[in-house]
Image (cartoon, rainbow, N blue to C red):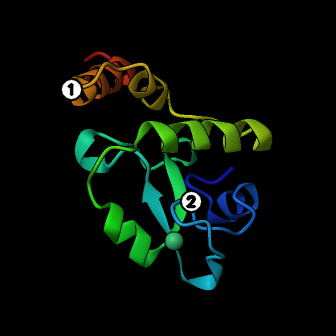
Amino acid sequence: MRIGDPNLLAISQRGRCFYCGEVVGAKATVDHFIPQCYGGIDDIANTVLAHRRCNIDKGDRLPTPDEIERLIEIRRHARLPVWPPILALRDAEDGEEWIVVARAVAALRPSQ
Ligand SMILES: [Zn+2]
């Protein structure tokens, strides 16, 4: 499996943009579900297929609870992995999301 394989993402999302649900076609971009500025990795476990426009609109925000549930559902059907910090974010209390993500990301890094 290639990292962030767009074909695999396209198949798992039935060729549709993760954010608006419309067909993405050849102009699909790969969005980092947990943004890279939060430590989000460049791996299929943390990426979704989206229109360029929808990707730009999402920007650098963390995914909403609805988006997280939708991703988990899609991944379960496709038997694709979900990056553990996404699951940690799902269980975070209001207002402490970024702290929970930072801790979960740090926990995955090999100790030096
Ligand atoms: Zn879209």
Question: Where does the image place residue 107, in percent across and percent down from the top left?
Answer: 34, 17
Question: Where does the image place residue 2, in percent across and percent down from the top left?
Answer: 63, 54
Q: Is residue 37 left or right of residue 51?
A: left
Badge 2 marks a residue whose secondary structure is loop
Q: Residue drawn 73% across and 54% down?
A: 12
User: Which is nearer the N-term, disc 1 or disc 2?
Assistant: 2
Q: Local crowd at mark 1 within 10 Å, few (<14), some, or many (≥20)? A: few
Q: Which mark is residue 95?
A: 1
Q: Based on the displayed image, in which of its 4 quarters is residue 57 positioned?
A: bottom left
Badge 1 marks a residue whose secondary structure is loop
Q: Residue drawn 45% across and 32% down?
A: 86
The reply to whether the C-beta atoms of the residues labelled 1 and 2 are less than 8 Å apart is no
Q: Based on the displayed image, in which of its 4 quarters is residue 72 positioned?
A: top right
* Label 2 near ligand 1 (CB < 8 Å): yes
Q: Is residue 71 left or right of residue 14?
A: left
Question: Where does the image place residue 112, in percent across and percent down from the top left?
Answer: 25, 17
How far apart are the alpha carbons under marks 1 and 2?
25 Å
The correct choice, above or below, for 42 with respect to 100 in the image is below
Residue bearing the label numbered 2: 18
Residue at the bottom extreme of this rendering: 26
Q: Residue drawn 55% across and 41% down?
A: 45
The correct choice, above or below, for 75 with respect to 36 in the image is above
